[in-house]
Image: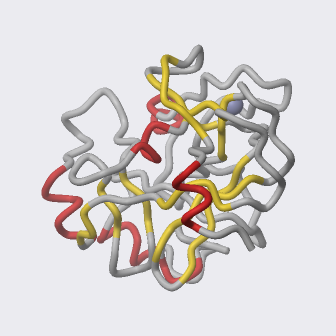
Amino acid sequence: MAKSAEQAAAPAYVIRRSKIQGRGGYAARAIKKGERIVEYLGQRISWAEADRRYDDTKVKRHHTFLFTVNNRTIIDAAFDGNDARFLNHSCDPNCEAIIEKSRVFIHAMKDIRKGAELLYDYSYARDKNTTEEDEKLYKCLCGSKSCRGTILEAPKKKKKVSAHHTASRHTAKKQKKTKGDGRKSGSSARR
Ligand SMILES: [Zn+2]
């Protein structure tokens, strides 16, 4: 197990402009598969508060700073967030988000060479109300060969694995409807 002190001494990544979108995180050194790279930090808020903050009927752009922890809590990295919020999505990621005791950590899924962009699959939760319009709003720009065209989770893949971001469009009310519908804990935080 890597010690956090070591990681603090040798930062695993730097933030700089990304070809995919805005800023991104890039490996500042070789990162080993399984290494914990950073915790996803931000204000911990309720679904109701996320709804209050972000009204998706009025916005053109999605809110990539929300991350579902469980059915009570969302992390809003727009407030008190750290650099983890700049890590971009890819449909062919080299990192994954793992929820541990209600905290979110970004881990390397594979060995990552120095200079590579750190990417994980946001897998925004879909539900019955997800429309083609949503798919467009959450268009993916990752450019990978396996790109599914949207940062929404792949449709009808119910067993999976990684934790994911929150599409604020899919909050409180809709969320209840989808309980047990592939979203563990009635939220988009599945493991
Ligand atoms: Zn993609």
Residue at image location 24% in from the left, 32% down from the top: 59
Q: Is residue 73 left or right of residue 38?
A: left
Q: Does residue 86 lie above or below 4 as drawn?
A: above
Q: How many marks?
A: 0
Q: How is the image coloured?
A: secondary structure
Residue ID at (13%, 58%): 52
Counting from the top left corner in percent of width and height, residue 143 is at 72, 20
142 vs 122: above or below: above
Q: Residue 22: which quarter of the image?
A: top left
Q: Which quadrant of the figure has residue 3?
A: bottom right
Residue 115 x %, y %: 71, 25
Residue 134 % position (x, y): 47, 38
Quadrant of the image where one finds ligand 1? top right
The quadrant the N terminus occupies is bottom right
Q: Does residue 136 appear left or right of residue 31 in this picture?
A: left
Residue 121 relative to residue 69: left or right: right
Foreground pick, 75 / 189: 75
Residue at x-position 23% and y-position 54%: 80
* Image point (62%, 54%), residue name: 37
Q: Nearer the viewer, residue 44 or 135?
A: 44
Q: Is residue 89 left or right of residue 76?
A: right
105 over 178 or under it: above or below: above
- Residue 72: where, in percent of width, then height? 34, 81
Q: Quadrant of the C terminus?
A: bottom right
